[in-house]
Amino acid sequence: MNPSDESLKATESAIFHPYQHQDYYGLDSLFLSPLKSDEIWNLTNVVNVNAPILAFLTLRSFLLKESTGQKLQLSGLHRNWKMYFAKSGYLNMNSSIGTHEFIPGIVPPTDTEVGLELDAVASPDWNSTLKWELKDNGKKTIFFVSAGRKESPTSKNLSELLSQFLVEIQKNDRLTRAYIRKETSSYLYLQSEDQIHPRVFFREDKAEMTEFLLFIAELIPA
């Protein structure tokens, strides 16, 4: 099933079935499809914890909360997800997501605080906001999600702020991919070992939703 098929399926039902892939444009099409009432996201087909999917799930849950006041419900959780949620405390940090499945409380949350400053964009100007970090086999993914502005936008362009942040985080790590998504446009950054500067792809793509910001950066040790 390709991303367009996933998006079509999402518009026909309140039950969503994401698949374990890493294509940001495909995830964008599915997770920014029209909002539904009583949404259930079944992760049966996503066996391993997937950082981009978790970031988009966070965004979707914030948008659903802003629009309907409802929680996004998760189902079909593989034990890998249950263990991750139990260890990280993610569900305690994001009250916009719920699940009827049992999540054991094993140990206090660990490795969940992003040790990077995002204060320029992660301000109280948003109704909902979350910074998160995941580590897997030497790879680190950080994401920042916010939705529902309470105040007018900052004078400096958010895309510029995040582009500057991309430069800062590469002092200790090397960027491989990054995705910046706002309600009107997106930026995809791709960088390989033999490139000095990343390739940047810009796309205008309006989502009929409240103001939001999604930032994902995938990093490996420099």
Image (tube, grey):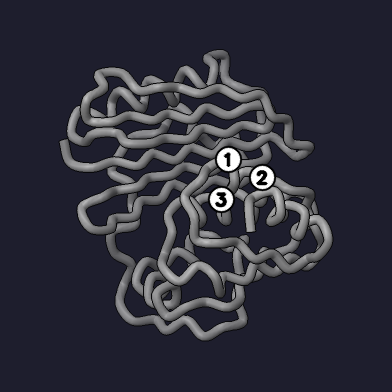
Q: Nearer the viewer, mark 3 or mark 2?
A: 2
- Which residue lies at the image location 43% right of the left edge and 46% below the top edge? 131
Residue ID for mark 3:
56
Q: Name the one closer to the observer, 161 or 138.
A: 138
Name the image quarter holding the N terminus: bottom right
Residue 211 lies, in percent from the top left, at 69, 34
Q: Nearer the viewer, mark 3 or mark 1?
A: 1
- Which residue lies at the image location 56% right of the left edge and 70% below the top edge? 43
Three-letter amino acid code at the position of disc 1: Tyr
Q: Name the one closer to the observer, 204 or 140.
A: 204
Residue 24 appears left or right of 11: left
**Crowding at label 1, few (<14), some or many (≥20) Cα neighbours within 10 Å?**
few
Residue 132 appears left or right of 12: left
- Which residue lies at the image location 29% right of the left edge and 64% below the top edge? 110
Above or below, 100 against 26 in this view is below
From mark 1 to mark 2, how far is it between C-alphas?
6 Å
Residue 156 appears left or right of 171: right
Q: Secondary structure at mark 3?
A: helix
Name the image quarter holding the C terminus: top left
Residue ID for mark 2:
29
Q: Secondary structure at mark 2?
A: helix
Residue 126 appears left or right of 83: right
Instruction: Verify CB contact (< 8 Å) between mark 3 and mark 1.
Output: no
Residue 153 lies, in percent from the top left, at 62, 22
Three-letter amino acid code at the position of disc 3: Phe
Answer with mark 3 or mark 2, whichever residue precedes in sequence: 2
State the mark number for residue 25.
1
